[in-house]
Image (cartoon, rainbow, N blue to C red):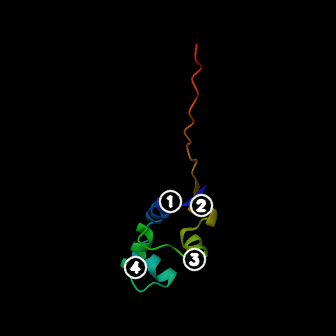
Amino acid sequence: MRTFNLIYIKNRRKELQISLQEMAVSLGFKNASTYMKYERGDYSFKAEHLPLLAKELNCKIENFFSLNVVKTATKRKRKAN
């Protein structure tokens, strides 16, 4: 299962020294606090945001997704002796 990786987006933005305000402007948001709510996960990025994010963060869209492996528990039947 793939999940959207907000930590990657935040870390990449910081690595490139891009401010919240710069990200807000590039995505067409009114202010930095609105963008911050998306980056924190309060709001969900929309599909049309992904190419803009990728361009600003100089990466591929697939970098925004991480593969999570779900652990499943199995029960073993004990053999009677």
Q: Give the SS element for disc 4.
A: helix
Q: Quadrant of the C terminus?
A: top right
Looking at the image, tell me whether mark 3 or mark 4 is earlier in sequence order.
Answer: 4
Which residue is tagged 2? 63
Tell me how far mark 2 sits from mark 4, CA to CA. 22 Å
User: Which numbered dot is residue 8?
Assistant: 1
Tell me how far mark 1 sits from mark 2, CA to CA. 8 Å
Q: Residue at x 55, y 43 (%)?
A: 71
Which residue is tagged 3? 52
Q: Give the SS element for disc 3.
A: helix
Looking at the image, tell me whether mark 2 or mark 4 is earlier in sequence order.
Answer: 4
Number of numbered labels in the structure image: 4
Q: Give the SS element for disc 1.
A: helix
Which residue is tagged 4? 34
The residue most toward the top is 81
Q: Residue at x 60, y 75 (%)?
A: 47
